[in-house]
């Protein structure tokens, strides 16, 4: 069974620490809040207009075993 977590539940924890923690608990998938009610603590949509920020974000996901979309 694959297990996923909606990360706004951990919004007080840094993005990288969330990824580390979830991976150590065997969590296979993450869903990131991108604004409005859940907030955007781990995924700012402004990075879509900043290639360096987007690349860094994707690298962090990949470094912790979470592949990102192309």
Image: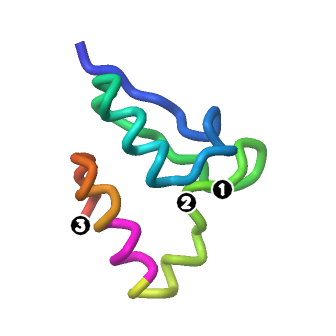
Overall secondary structure of the magenta stretch? helix
The residue closer to the viewer here, 68 or 42, is: 42
Query: At 51% from the left edge and 53% from the top edge, which residue is drawn?
Result: 15
According to the image, label 2 marks what residue?
A: 43
Q: Disc number at residue 49?
A: none
Answer yes or no: do the residues labelled 1 and 2 have beta carbons within 8 Å? Answer: yes
Residue 3, compared with residue 61, is above or below; it is above
Q: Is residue 38 magenta?
A: no
Which quadrant holds the N terminus?
top left
Span highlighted in magenta in the image: 53-58
Secondary structure at badge 1 equals loop
Query: At 42% from the left edge and 35% from the top edge, which residue is drawn?
Result: 21
Q: Is residue 33 left or right of residue 48?
A: right
According to the image, label 1 marks what residue?
A: 40
Q: Earlier in the sequence, mark 3 or mark 2?
A: 2
Residue 24, compared with residue 42, is above or below; it is above
The residue closer to the viewer here, 26 or 54, is: 26
According to the image, label 3 marks what residue?
A: 70
Query: At 34% from the left edge and 23% from the top edge, which residue is drawn?
Result: 25
Secondary structure at badge 3 equals loop
How many neighbours does mark 3 have within 10 angstroms: few (below 14), some (14-19), or many (20 or more)? few
Secondary structure at badge 2 equals loop
Could you tell me residue 59's position as x and y percent?
Answer: 29, 67
Q: Earlier in the sequence, mark 1 or mark 3?
A: 1
The residue closer to the viewer here, 13 or 44, is: 13
Could you tell me residue 61's position as x and y percent?
Answer: 32, 56
């Amino acid at each position: 069974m694959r297990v996923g977590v909606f990360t706004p539940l951990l919004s007080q924890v840094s993005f990288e620490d969330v990824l580390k923690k979830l991976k150590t608990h065997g969590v296979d998938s993450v869903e990131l809040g991108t604004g409005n009610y859940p907030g955007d603590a781990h995924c700012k949509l402004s990075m879509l207009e900043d290639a360096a920020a987007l690349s860094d974000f994707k690298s962090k996901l990949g470094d912790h075993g979470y592949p990102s979309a192309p």
